[in-house]
Amino acid sequence: MTDFKAAQKTLDAEIEQLDVDIAQCRSRIDFLESTKLELKSRRNALAPIGRLPPELIVKIFSSSLGLLSSSQLSEFRDYKPRARFVVEDDVQEARAKDAIYRRLLRPDVLTLSHVSHGWRSLSFETRDLWSRIQVQLRTSPELLKLMWRNAGEGMIELGITGMLDDRSDNKFHSFPVFNLVYALLQIGSSKLRSIGIYCRASSFLNALHGRAESLESLTIKGDELYRDPEEEEVVYDTIFEGGTPNLRRLEISSLAIPWTSSLLLSSPHLTQVALGLTPRPSPDSFAAFFAFLRHSPRLTTLAVDLGAPEGDEESDYYLSLVSNRTPIQLHGLKALRLDSVLQGPIDAILNLLRVPSDISSLTLTASEGSPGLAETVLAVHTSMCGPNGNIAPEEMDLGYTQARCWREQRFEWYMEDRDHPRKRLKLADKPTWMYLQVTMPFERHLEQTVYRLPWSLTKLRSISIHRPEVPATFWAALADLATLEVVRIETRNSEPFLQALAGDSDAITPIIGAVHTPPAPLPSLDDITRERVQRNTFPALSAVWFTQLSHGLSGPGPGSPIPPDAAAAFVIKIVAAFNKRARPTLLEEIKFLNCDRSTLAEAALNILSSVTRCVVWDRVAFILQRLPND
C-alpha cells in the first residue's frame, strides 16, 4: 500500500510539472503569436500601399469598384442560368453573364471589405464606397440594408434588374428584395442621385412620387409583358410630380409620358433625353413637344420614337397648333435620333428644329416610304455657320432605302497584290454622322424622289450612289468639286456620271442594258480619243468603283453577267469620258465589283491603261504599266 501511494505521489508531481510546462509553452506561444503579428504589421508597413495616406487608398478602392453599365443591367433581363453544356461559340458570353450574376449577388465592395481588418475598417468608414447599389431580385435584403446603412447620408445611385425567369407574374412580388426596394424608393427619394429600373417598371412607379431634389439620372427600361391585371393603374404623368430640378439624364423605354409631364417641364438642366414611347403624334402633342424643346436649351442628346400617327398627314397638320414658329436653336445638340412610322412627323420637327452644323450623330428612320422622303430628310436645317451656312460632310452614301453621311471620311479602299505592291489608299474609320433610312420603301415612291442637297459640298471627298436614278444635274454639280476623290456607283446608273465626267451631256450614249449585238472589233486609243474641251472635270478624282457590271432590266435578266463585248464597250465609254477632260490624269484605281471574271478581255485592260494605274476586276487586281511610247 505504501509503495502504491509513493508511486502515485511521484506521478502527480510529474503531471503537475507537465501542467507547468504546458502553461509556459502556451505563454510562449502567445508571446510568439504576438511577436508574429507585430512583425507582420511592421512588414506590411514597409509595403508601398501601407505608406499611402487613407485618402489615397480610398480613391484606389473607388476606382476598382466599377459599376455595371446601363446596357449590362438591361441585357441581364434576358439572362438564364447556364445549362450543363454550352455551345462553344456562346461560352464567352455565358461566362460574362455569369460574372454579372455573381457581382449582383455579392458586390465588389463586400469582397474588398473582407481582405483584411484594416481594409474592412477603412471601407466601412468610407460612405461613398457603399453608395453605388446595384441589385437583382435574388440579392439578399440584408445585403441591401447593409449597403444602404453604410452609405449614411451620402447620395445613392440605385439600380435593380432581374433575370428572365424571375420577372414572371407568379414570382416577381415574392422576392423579399422587391418590397425593400419599393420601400426605399418611397422614403429615400431625397437622397437618390440616380435611379435605374430594369424590371417590371410599373410595379415601382407608384413609389416615385413627390419631389426628388437631388435626382440627376432616371432610367426606366422595364417590361410590361407580365403585368398583373389587378395591379393598381399607374398614372405616368405623376412621376415625381413635385419636380426634379437637377435631373440631367432621362431614358424611358417601357412607358409613355406626356410632353406636359412635370418630369420634363420641371427639369431645366436636362442634357440627355431618350424616350422609346411617346404620345401619339397629333397637333396637340406636337405643340407640347415643341414647348418642351424650347424649355430645354441644354439638350446634347435627343432620341425619340414618335410612334404611329392616326393618319398619313403632312407636316403642316402637326404644326397647326404651334403658335410660335420661330426656329428652335439647340446649339449644344450632339446627337439626334427620330423614329417614326410615317414621314409627316419627321418633316414637322425638321421644319422648326435647327440642327447644329457640328452635330456628331443624326439618325432619321421612317418605317414606311412616301413620296419625297429623301427630299425632306436631306433638307436638314442648320443653325451654325459653315460653308454657305450648310453642313459640309466629307462622305455621302445614298442607297435605295437609306442615306448616310460622315463628317470626316471613313471610306477605306486599297488593294495590294503580293507580286505588285502598290500605294495604299486607306482613310480613317469614323462613326456615321448622319443616317437616314426608309425601312419599307416602295418603288413607285423612289421613282418620284428628286434630290436636293441643302448642305455644302465643298468638303466632299467620296460619294457612293446606289439609287435607281440620279439626275444629271446632280453629277454636273459634283464635277466642279476640287475635293472629290472617290466615286462609287452602280454601273447601270452610271450614265449621268460619265456625261458629267466628259463635260458634255451629248457625248455619251447608253450601252449597258441595251440589247446585245454581235461583237465588233475594238478600236484603238486614237479612235476613242475625242476633241478635248477646256474643262477639267472632277480634278481630284483618284478612284472610281463600278458595281453590278451586268445587264439591266432589258437584258437577259437582272443581275446576269454581260458578254465580254459589252464589257469592253463599257470600258471604251469610260476611257472616252476620261479623255474628254482638259487635263487627263492617271487614276490610282478603277474597280469593277460583282462581275464575272470571264467577261474581261485583255484588250480592255490595254485600253484602261491610259487612264488608271490599277484595275480591280471582281477581286483580282491588275497593275497596269504603260509602254514608253504611250
Image: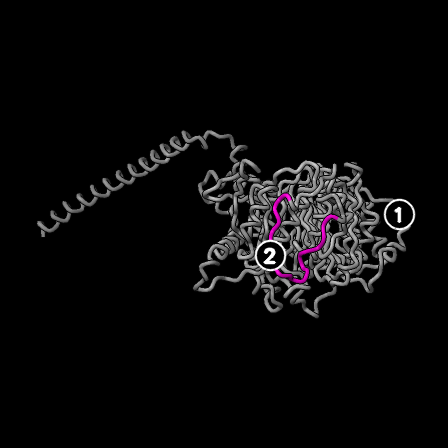
Q: Quadrant of the C terminus?
A: top right
Labelled disc at residue 325:
1
Q: CA distance from mark 2 to mark 1?
A: 60 Å
Q: Secondary structure at mark 2?
A: helix
Residue 304 visible, this angle: no
**Residue sitting nearer the eye, 365 or 30:** 365
Q: Is residue 372 visible?
A: yes
Front residue of 4 and 74: 74
Pointer 2 with pointer 1, Cβ within 8 A: no
Q: Is residue 516 inside the magenta stretch?
A: yes
What residue would you read off at disc 2?
565
Which kind of residue does numbered mark 1 sit on? Arg
Q: Position of residue 449 (x, y in %)?
A: 78, 56
How many numbered marks appear? 2
Q: What is the span of residues highlighted in magenta in the rendered image?
A: 507-526
Q: Secondary structure at mark 1?
A: loop
For the residue carrying disc 1, how many other residues have a C-alpha within 10 Å: few (<14), some (14-19), or many (20+)? few
Which residue is located at x 54 percent, y 35 percent?
Answer: 628
Q: Position of residue 531 (x, y in %)?
A: 71, 41
Along the polypeptide, which appears first: circle 2 or circle 1?
Answer: 1
